[in-house]
Amino acid sequence: MDQVTLGRRLLRFRYLVTRALRHRLVLNPAPSADALISELHRLHKKAAQILIDTTIELESDLRRVNETDKNTSEANKYQHWLASVASCCETFVEFAFRSCDVHHLYKGPRFGFLDQQNVQSVLKVTEEVNKSPHLFAFPLDFTRFSCTGDVLCISRSPANSRVAIMEIKEGEVNDAIRDARKAKAAGTWAKFFQTYGEKGIQQARRVFKQEKEFYKREARMQATRGIHNDEDGMRVVLESETPLDNFLPTVEAVCRKARNGEYAIEVIDGCLMVAAGDATSIRRAMLAEADARLFALNAFGPPDMAKKSPEMIAHAMDKVTLTDWLDGLGAISLLPLCLRPLSARTFLDLAFGRIRLLFFFHPPGFINLLQEAGINAEFLSSKETNRLRTTKGLRTSDLPPLHEGRAMSYYIKDTLCYVGSMRFHEMVFNWACPRSLVAQMADAISTAPDIPKHHSRTRTESRKPTL
């Protein structure tokens, strides 16, 4: 598959899930609820099939490249395209759940090709469910992550509106496990173990473990404001009704400037720099990155940096930490690009990496925003930061860029918390305005419950209230 074909399919998918229903309502402005739901599902099923067919075709191309050409750059291209398509598949997950709940659906990265899994069985079930005009089903194997189930099923029937996650099991052993659970008779499991031996025992353990994990995550998704305890420790759930503003117009503007060969750098709320560069040329991409590093150094670095020698300036530029927007394809909180009201040109340029978006985050500026909003915020010391990473098992990616080796912290009443990667990702990958994010945090903290002191495993989680 070439880039032109893939681009047309992505644009077609975006149209079907965002604007097609509105255009059809012009022809029939007052449809019945039943007709509206049927038409919505028909469009979504059509859009879903585009992504399913595209994913299977791209995986076939990637397998061919891996087996024959051994061309690393060609393989990387297909992997990038597959990640972009998988991100679009998560559009349906965004429709089904609140954005703050989505990460509970994912267990971890997805590995391997789809034909190595039971994807054909899942597709058969999905096809059968989608025969109903009131149901929409989508196979979760096509997303970027391994999920707690195989199929997302949305019912929008006027009499029954709900979301369900289905797990598909096949094979003789799984059928026997199902029958044993249904029987609830003495000796049923003993007969099962005698028939299937160690293989049956291991499979039964996997089934029960998976079911336990599913219900644990479901409980977290349904949790409301307050303190919740489970086997992983104490979880403090905060809620805020403050909406998040974004700087999407700024992204559109810098991308347009980059296409025209102009200087394309902006600063958002005094703590976040966004730069765009034309990545269709290696020379232009390198110049754009150098411009971004130099601008970040001049805007957020020491005031006397301009007086330093060229060698010292070049050394300082190399230490500037830039975040590439494409890294967001590996972030669990990424909002699908097709749901953002971008022009078609910018949408495709970002999806294919033809325009490179680079971000620089300035932690002291963010701390200032927190303090201006009335939040007690400060930097941890280097020693405290290292202790935090050790005791909580945090990786480098679990925290925003450190400032001189120090992490950002804030207080919820008397409890010390740290700023994690999710808020950072909201800004650089989902383009949330830092000041708006801080306002949401302040609103959530103002209604926070009292947190028991000296709890060794405490996690905080902000979300929108359940409607």
Image: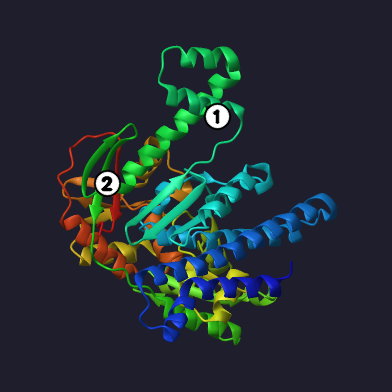
Q: Is residue 93 shown left or right of residue 30?
A: right
Quarter of the rendering occupied by the C terminus: bottom left
Query: What x and y, as percent, mark residue 353?
Result: 62, 70
**The quadrant where residue 74 appears:** bottom right
Quarter of the rendering occupied by the N terminus: bottom right
Q: Within 10 angstroms of label 2, few (less than 14), some, or many (20 or more) residues?
A: some
Tell me the amino acid under the disc marked 1.
Asp
Residue 284: mark in rendering: none
User: Up-down: is 345 above or below 330?
Assistant: below
Colour option used: rainbow
Q: Is residue 446 shown left or right of residue 84?
A: left
User: Up-down: is 272 above or below 455?
Assistant: below
User: Up-down: is 143 above or below 7?
Assistant: above
Q: Image point 55% across, 22% down: which residue?
A: 202
Q: CA distance from mark 2 to mark 1?
A: 33 Å
| Label 2 element class | loop
Tell me the amino acid under the disc marked 2.
Ala
Along the line of sight, the residue nearer the viewer: 413 or 205 = 205
Residue 175: mark in rendering: 1
User: Up-down: is 420 above or below 230?
Assistant: below
| Label 1 element class | helix
Q: Within 10 angstroms of label 1, few (less than 14), some, or many (20 or more) residues?
A: few
Nearer-N-terminus badge (2/1) = 1
| Residue 462 appears anywhere in the view | yes
Q: Is residue 407 shown left or right of residue 338?
A: left
Query: What x and y, as percent, mark residue 433?
Result: 35, 70
Which residue is under mark 2? 223
Q: Image point 49% across, 26% down: which residue?
A: 179
**The quadrant where residue 248 appears:** bottom left
Along the line of sight, the residue nearer the viewer: 211 or 448 = 211
Query: What x and y, as percent, mark residue 295?
Result: 49, 75
Along the line of sight, the residue nearer the viewer: 163 or 38 = 38
